[in-house]
Image (tube, helix red, strand yellow):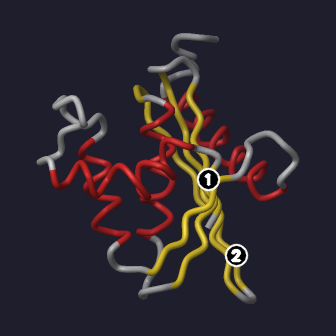
Amino acid sequence: MHTDGACRGNPGPGGWGVILRTTGAEKELCGGEAQTTNNRMELTAAIRGLEALKVACRVQAYTDSQYLRTGISAWLPQWKQRGWRTADRKPVKNEDLWRRLDELAAQHEIHWHWVKGHAGNADNERADALANHGLEETLQAMGGRSGAGR
């Protein structure tokens, strides 16, 4: 699974993209939201990818988001122990998405990998293109309004 998120303005309109691949099959997914953040789109991409799996799987998950990879691998267990609070006792940002990702991740055996974004990794570049496609579709649905940062 290769995931990516995109945002025009932060916050602003955003998109997410996912490539799911297994032996002999590949599926691409994308979508977007009118008002979001890049981190929410990174999380949403992983969530949508895992939601698309019909049975428990061994997943190699690739992301260019340190927020996603470190969050799921290191921070999430600590947040849960602290009642969804950060080390400085503040509420966890994007708690709704982290909870959903945690629920989905528990159904699979997932190995999370970080890849450098925009560095020539073909699958990461494709996931980025899908995220931007989801963003553009969202902008069109909004009547072409580009939001902040454009």
- Residue 83, percent from left and from top: 11, 48
Q: Is residue 150 above or below residue 114?
A: above
Q: CA distance from mark 1 to mark 2?
A: 17 Å
- Residue 137, percent from left and from top: 59, 37
Q: Is residue 95 above or below residue 21?
A: above
Sequence order check: which comes first, mark 1 or mark 2?
A: 2
For the N terminus, the image quarter is: bottom right
Numbered circle sitting on residue 149: none
Asked whether 66 or 56 is in front, the reply is 66
- Residue 33, percent from left and from top: 44, 36
* Badge 2 amino acid: Glu
Image point (26%, 52%), residue name: 78
Question: Which residue position is annotated with label 1?
Answer: 63
* Badge 1 amino acid: Thr
In the image, is 111 to the left or to the right of 92? right
Image point (23%, 48%), residue name: 79
Farthest left residue in view: 83
Image point (45%, 69%), residue name: 50
**Badge 2 density bin: few <14, some 14–19, many ≥20, Cα 10 Å:** few
Name the quadrant containing residue 6.
top right
Mark toward the viewer: 1 or 2: 1
For the C terminus, the image quarter is: top right
Q: Is residue 51 above or below residue 108?
A: above
Asked whether 142 or 27 is in front, the reply is 27
Question: Which residue position is annotated with label 2?
Answer: 26
**Badge 1 density bin: few <14, some 14–19, many ≥20, Cα 10 Å:** many
